Amino acid sequence: MQPLSDRSNPLITAFPAELASDAEAVLAVMPDSRLQPHASFSVTVEGQKVLIPGRLYNDEPPTDRVASLSSRQQQLLHCLYSRHCDGMVRQRHLAKVVGSTDPWVVPFVVQLVGEYVLEILVVICDELRDLATPGTCGHLAYGQFLVDNPAFFARTQRRVVSYWSCYYRGTYASFRGYPGCTILDLLRSAASDRAGHPWPNLAPAGARVDGYC
């Protein structure tokens, strides 16, 4: 099992400092991995910089060890395993937290928007539809996160277009029909309301209309 650690641990730094003790409890039930977390990325959550792993290689912990954690600790565990190297593991753990509007969950969901697993995009698209409704918890939480992390959101938008262009043109001839496009529309709506002005749409104009970049 993972040793308890401090804020230098790359899995503890994935969450705001006030959650460090909960993150340590999560690490205590996670099996060891021969590989270190890979390609971490930095975002701001409620004014704090956090460093989230791009990929995690630990096996999933036994069910009874997960059940021993508090509900908040289980939430953090699911967030971490949404960064797993296996797409099916990512999807399974995403499903446990995608409905949450806690600010430390939001970046894990947005990162998955900019990745390539279509089934994960469908899960996110279905869950985040209330982002179109001003005043909802999701609208506010995602809007604030995106306003606080404009470069991260810009990169996410570009990745969505790139993965559609590389892998899904045959299924979705028009970018407008692609689930990733729907999610970006929802996210931009939340960011626009929070910022007080229209958020830039970084999808190429042709992709927005007829599916050709």
Image (spheres, rainbow, N blue to C red):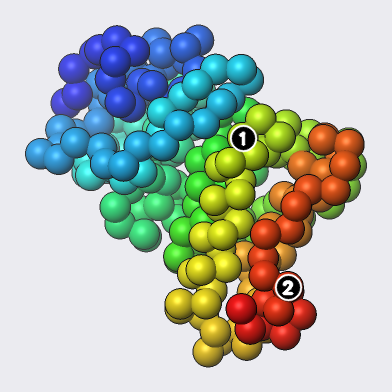
> Label for residue 43?
none
**Nearer to me, 203 or 58:** 203
Residue 122 in sight here: no
The residue type indicated by label 2 comes to Ala
Residue 13 in which image quadrant: top left
**Nearer to me, 64 or 59:** 59
Q: Which quarter shows the N terminus?
A: top left
* Image point (61%, 78%), residue name: 213
1 or 2: tag closer to the N-terminus: 1
* Image point (23%, 44%), residue name: 57
Q: Secondary structure at mark 2?
A: helix
The residue type indicated by label 1 comes to Asn
Q: Which residue is mark 1?
A: 149
Q: Is residue 91 left or right of residue 141?
A: left
Q: Secondary structure at mark 1?
A: loop
* Image point (67%, 77%), residue name: 207
From the image, state whether disc 1 or disc 2 is nearer to you. 2
**Nearer to me, 97 or 57:** 57
Residue 39 in which image quadrant: top left
Residue 94 in sight here: yes
Query: Residue 189 appears at what percent x and percent y?
Result: 81, 50
> Label for residue 205?
2
Residue 73, placed above or below residue 107: above
* Image point (41%, 37%), residue name: 41
Query: Residue 108 appears at what percent x and percent y?
Result: 51, 41
